[in-house]
Image (tube, grey):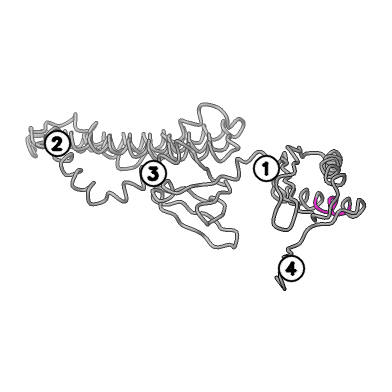
Amino acid sequence: MTDIVIWENSLLSWLQALISFIGVYLFLVILIKLAKSRLNAVLKRNDKLPTSYILPFLEHTKNFFLLTLSLYIASIWVFLSEKPSTYLKTIFMIALWIQVGIWVNHLIIKFIDFRNLKEANGEDKTTMNALKTILRIVLWSIVLLLVVDNIPGVQITALVTSLGIGGIAIGLAVQNILGDLFASLSITLDKPFVINDFIQVDNYIGTVEKIGLKSTRIRSLSGEQLIFSNSDLLNSRIQNFKRLERRRNIIKLGVLYQTTPDQLRKIPEIIKNIFSKHEGITLDRIHLSDFGDFSINFELVYWVESSDFTFNMDVKQSILLEIFDEFIKNNIEFAYPTQSIFIENNGNSNPST
């Protein structure tokens, strides 16, 4: 076998390289399977161990990388000229960086998903999901540059410069898309709202279902899905009812002009007594506010110490009914629109209602 020469290497050298290639590949495959089996058994007993982060390395080790690594190791048995040696090294380095990118990508996903399981509120989950997207974009951008840097004859500096110039042209062409993308990052970092928040955008009201890279989806009260571009959403006035801690309510009461001064003075006391019977509400003020066209007006302001809209309406209903009952007991009548007309006849003005 030593007498037979193929591409400057004896047949024995080629056989040694082939055996080495097969042996290394099988060894790596079996080693990974045994390690995965062992780690899974350990994690079944305690899934919070740091060793859980080793699994992405094993589960996502690709065959193309194992084959390239085995081939690179086996090449030590043969002599290769400069060009084949360069090609083999290039292929190995490209496979290596792609595999590193796959490993780190799944580590990022596992870490963010693990944090999301621990977080109870939508605000932190939204931030972590945006962080995952940003980290993955940065990761694969770096991997792409490292892969290109290992291609013979490619000048990475000139490539980056040309990409920068091309990026400006592309940016002008897709400025609306980029605007929505940066608006998505702004929403995520500034958090004017998060997933599951109940918001109002102009005349549209609903619950936030998803904050995407280009658009945000809101489920309206009537059931349909509303889709807003992120840039338009940030330029709108947004009311976030989820962060409402207490509600301020105003009730205007109008009574007849025939109401006596003593009855007028009694109205604030009646209102205060009604509010003293309720929990979870705070009377801010009750005042005689003005003399209207057909009524004497009172303005009542109070706070409901809850963001629950149903509770707010229940309280308001109860208060209005009690005011109605108390006014009847005290012979106080609510005003209603009336108009007096004065008719001039023979120099005398006689009012007619």
Q: Say which residue label 2 marks.
A: 161
Between marks 1 and 2, how big is the CA–CA gap? 58 Å
Q: Tell me if 271 is positioned left or right of 198 in this view.
A: right
Going from the N terminus, do you reach mark 1 or mark 2 first? 2
Q: Which residue is mark 4?
A: 348
Q: CA distance from mark 4 to mark 1?
A: 51 Å
- Label 4 with label 1: CB-CB less than 8 Å: no
The amino acid marked with disc number 1 is Arg
Dot 3 lies on which element?
helix
Could you say whether the residue bearing mark 1 is in a helix, strand or loop?
Answer: strand
Q: Amino acid at mark 3?
A: Ala
Q: Earlier in the sequence, mark 3 or mark 2?
A: 2
Looking at the figure, which quarter contains the C terminus? bottom right
Which residue is label 3 attached to? 183
Which kind of residue does numbered mark 4 sit on? Answer: Asn
Picture layout, residue 102 above or below residue 216: above
Crowding at mark 4 (Cα within 10 Å: few <14, some 14-19, many 20+): few
**204 or 10, nearer to the observer:** 204
Q: Nearer the viewer, mark 1 or mark 2?
A: 1
Q: Earlier in the sequence, mark 2 or mark 4?
A: 2
Kindly tell me whether residue 207 is visible in this rendering: yes
Looking at the rendering, which quadrant does residue 88 occupy?
top left
